[in-house]
Image: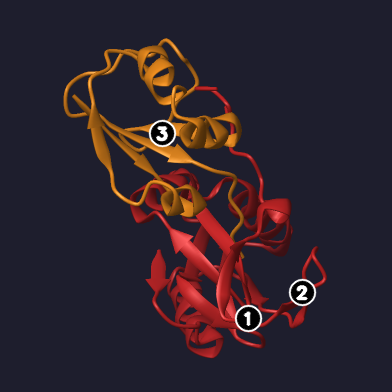
Amino acid sequence: MVTVNFLGPAAEDFPEAFCLEAHSLAELASVLNDDELAAKWLKISAVAVNGHIASNAQMPLKTGDLVQILPPVCGG
Amino acid sequence: MKIFSHPLDSSALHAEFYAAARGRNLGAFISFAGIIRAELNEAGEQVEGLSFDIEPALLANWLAEYRAKETSEIAYFFAHAKGDVMAGECSYFAAVAARKREAALREISAFVEDFKRRAPIWKYDIVGGKRVYAAARSFALPHAGLLA
């Protein structure tokens, strides 16, 4: 099981982190994209795995990994 | 890295960071303060202030890239507010200190711009007392859409 957490404005739609069974980011994407709201955010969001931005959709996941969904940012 | 749950005291931060630069024998110190403007947003609504969400662990990772670049000749300083910051108040204070001015002038621009585009902070307009995500002014992170 991995933990999925939508951050920033996406947290308004998914206020709580949740756990899913997925062995890769691609597998996770397949599950999440079944949800219309999640798919909307995934289109524009980057993904961090255990604190680091992922660049490979085939990246394997293991139990306990934290996957964070990061919508477009703007500080300052 | 300093994250405050209230508007920043830019004078106090300036004094603190300046003293740290002096302590490291760095000869050029340049600071940047972000002050909230009172203006209309893209929808023509009056913006009373801004509000910020921050993911501290990811922000620390972003800042770590600059910590890794620090030497005896350059240092980076950073503070940001989370939550609501109203017009006229300070939300962001950054500084670079370098041995000489050329590096400080170059790095403050890169540091501030990179922060704007890559740091895990989300901005909202405060309109009528409610938070509205500033989507039009936000920047997609590298590899955005990877799971689409």
Q: Is the Cβ of the residue at disc 1 closer than 8 Å to that at disc 2?
A: yes
| Above or below: residue B1 compared with residue B127 | above
Q: Position of residue A60 (x, y in %)?
A: 31, 13
| Above or below: residue B48 compared with residue A73 | below
- Name which quarter of the figure residue A61 lies in: top left
Amino acid at pointer 2:
Glu
- Name which quarter of the figure residue B116 lies in: bottom right
Q: Looking at the image, can residue B71 be seen? A: no
- Dot 3 lies on which element? strand
Looking at the colours in the rendered structure, which chain would you say is drawn in red?
B
Real-space CA distance between mark 3 and mark 2, rounded to the nearest whole angstrom: 34 Å
Query: What shade does chain A have?
Result: orange
Q: Nearer the viewer, residue B125 or B73?
A: B125
Residue under label 1: B128
Amino acid at pointer 3:
Ala
Q: Nearer the viewer, residue A51 or A15?
A: A15
Residue under label 2: B45
